[in-house]
Amino acid sequence: MSLTTDSWLALVVSLPSAAATPRMRIWRAVKALGCAALRDGAYLLPAPAEQAAQLQTLADEALREGGQAWLLRVHAQDMAEQVAYQALFDRTTDYTPWLEELAQARQLLPTLSAAELQRLQRRHGRAYEAIRKIDFFPGETSTRAEAQWRDFTNAVDALQSPGEPQTTAGRIARRDRMQYQGRLWATRRHLWVDRVASAWLIQRFIDPSARFLWLESPVDCPSDALGFDFDGATFSHVGDRVTFEVLLSSFGLDGDRGLLRLGSMVHALDVGGTATPEACGFEAVLAGARKRWPDDDALLADMGGVLDSLHAHFSTHRKP
């Protein structure tokens, strides 16, 4: 969030001395909204901030608790005062400890399991978003934090899915399933969401006699194998579609409602987007299965049953 404004809202509240609990509740609320404290009971917020609408709610709460409250619109008299107001919202003291924790977490990444990596990324992501939400005037520290967070997420992605494919442009050609029977299919080992779902799709709906080769590196892919979900593979990301969705379109399976909803789940878990309610559960089950089954053939067999059940569920239950 980056604002340009010379208009501010000042919330001034005064509560009875006995109202310690409401006073603490209001103080925590104004802090969460990103207000700057001018003095005890006086708080400032940029008028265009989306949080500004909530100041009236706090003023009303102070009145209900027997106190007094004023919500005032303030304009900076000159540029010097404007700069002084903006300086009150410098988030360096918020970003600094977060950056230190992120640097420490970065050192731990190679030692963590897939599930632990996901939890760590979510925890630091929530903290980062909480600061960004109230960073009304981003500066040098904000830029550094954004770069460090991007590097951190890239490092997690690299550990979770080494060699993750890059998106390519172009149209998706329709394929004849009869020409793809009894083939050798190859993808990167240590299956994660898109690869395990794509392998299941191939086995269940495209090539029931498929044989799979799990590659240490994409460069090891034999010339007679059909590669999927890596750069240069026969089937990989195209446009905004992940490999699972590309396979659906390639083989005319995109008329199956259950497969389409599975595709939405895989898409959200692989590259982001609106997740289905089942997504977190599937991700957790897959992370657990990877601990139980270091062998990818066994992992696919185990997760195949989960995907069968999800497909049945998605085929018979409409979106809420």
Image (spheres, rainbow, N blue to C red):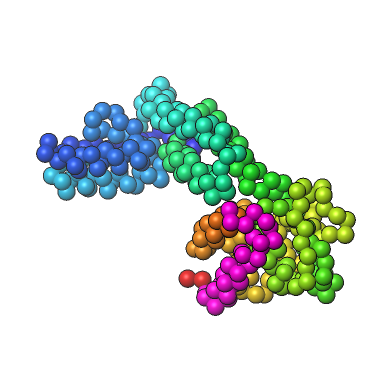
Q: Residue at x 45, y 40 (%)?
A: 127
Q: Residue at x 47, y 71 (%)?
A: 320
Instruction: From the top left corner, tell me how far across and down residue 92 is, in percent.
Output: 45, 28
Residue 72 sits in quarter: top left
Q: Is residue 13 left or right of residue 231?
A: left
Q: Nearer the viewer, residue 284 or 238?
A: 284
Q: Is residue 209 left or right of residue 48?
A: right
Up the image or down, 56 lies above or below 173; here it is above
Instruction: From the top left corner, tell me how far across and down residue 98 is, in percent.
Output: 46, 33
Q: Is residue 94 left or right of residue 275?
A: left
Question: Residue 306 colored magenta?
Answer: yes
Question: Where does the magenta region start and end?
Answer: 291-318
Q: Nearer the viewer, residue 297 or 101?
A: 297
Q: Residue at x 16, y 48 (%)?
A: 64
Instruction: From the top left corner, tell me how far across and down residue 168 is, in percent.
Output: 75, 52
Confirm whether residue 260 shows in the render: no
Instruction: From the top left corner, tell me how far across and down residue 103 is, in percent.
Output: 53, 31
Confirm whether residue 182 shows in the render: yes
Total marks shown come to 0
Q: Nearer the viewer, residue 183 or 71?
A: 183
Residue at the farthest top position: 80
Question: Residue 307 colored magenta?
Answer: yes
Magenta stretch: dominant SS? helix
Residue 311 sits in quarter: bottom right
Residue at the farthest bottom position: 316
Up the image or down, 208 lies above or below 218; here it is below
Q: Residue at x 67, y 56 (%)?
A: 295
